[in-house]
Image (cartoon, helix red, strand yellow):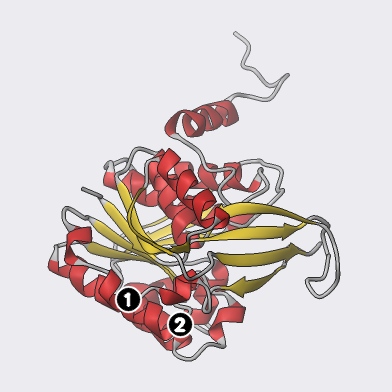
Amino acid sequence: MPEIVTVGELLVDVLAETVGQALSAPGRYLGPYPSGAPAIFADQAARLGVATAIAGAVGADAFGKAVLDRLRASGVDVGAVRVLDDATTGVAFATYFADGGREFLFHMKDAAPGRFRADDVTAALFAGCRFFHIMGSSLFSPPMIAAIRRGIALAEAAGARISFDPNIRPALLRAPGVAEAIHEIARRADILMPSEVDLAFLCPGEEVEAALETLLSWRASRVFLKLGAAGSRYADRSQRLSAPPFATTEIDPTGAGDCAGATFLASLLRDLPLERSLARANAAGALAVAKRGPMEGNSDEATLSAFIADAAKPAPGQEKRG
């Protein structure tokens, strides 16, 4: 039985090869890479030994096979993923810019992810579940919003808690009901995992400390704030913690926040100390950005532990001398 369940988009990413390459112009592209924020999250949690399941839809095509093969290899339960003969797997085209910005072009609403319905989310999926994890990027259409609302009701009925990564995507905010659903679910979540962009969306005009207080005035008892290259912060109603980043070479930032969030939640499920949980989450994010492709930098327990241990070693010439 899965400890973590997630519902949402499964797709492939096709990445512009050159930084600054416009999606509106011809160019070279790399991929397909298995992707989708909930799929990246599930893949990372499963690699860390947490029983994880995902529900969604893919087409009966090569892209769908690529995604499912990857998730199965990592140990994710994909039994609730529908494989549709009359739809294609979702695709996201992405390009990166020198200032760190990104642009996405999604093909989801009219592809297999857009065919997923509330009736596809069943009570059996949540048997034994401890966390239902939701990604804001999955709230891209009214049917998917309805499916996730049903998932919340079923998860709560099963005694599971709700974790939510708002994962704000400007391109998706234009869709009807998306912004409202993000605000609604943020107020129903037990754990919130925002980025700085998400924090500004949820608490416009507020400084970080004030925004954390606002989030904790809702239902959430924990906030894991992802700060990218600046590390992360943690807040609950009794304490605040900060964790520094790990040195890394950024190649592809997509999926890093998903990996960090999955690692943080997996660490909580294993009752690890908060300081260690934050360090592990930051390390997972650092490993993720160092590989091209949203899931290609995902890490298992051995890789994560080795990376943290190596980072703790003194630099050459700085060793203690007796």
Residue 89 locus on image (x, y percent): 53, 64
Circle 1: element type? helix
Q: Which residue is mark 2?
A: 141
User: Could you tell whether 236 is left or right of 251 in the image?
Assistant: left
Q: Quadrant of residue 240?
A: bottom left
Type of amino acid under label 2: Ser
Please give the residue where the numbered disc 1 appears in the rendered image: 147
As shown in the figure, which amino acid type bears the numbered disc 1?
Ala
Left or right: where 143 falls relative to 9: left
| Residue at the image point whose x is 41% and y is 85% from the top | 142
Residue 181 x %, y %: 39, 83
Quadrant showing the C terminus: top right
Left or right, residue 263 beside residue 158: right
Q: Tell me which residue sits at (38%, 74%) in the image.
A: 215
**Location of residue 131 in the rendering, given as x and y in whole percent from the top left corner:** 27, 58
What secondary structure is marked by label 2? loop
Estimate the spatial distance between the alpha carbons at disc 1 and disc 2, rounded to whole Å. Answer: 10 Å
Using the rendered image of the protein, determine whether residue 263 is visible from the camera's viewpoint: no
User: For mark 1, does the 10 Å Cα neighbourhood hold few (<14), some (14 to 19), or many (20 or more) residues?
Assistant: many
Q: Nearer the viewer, residue 164 or 152?
A: 152
Q: From the viewer's perspective, tell me whether residue 252 is left or right of residue 78.
A: right
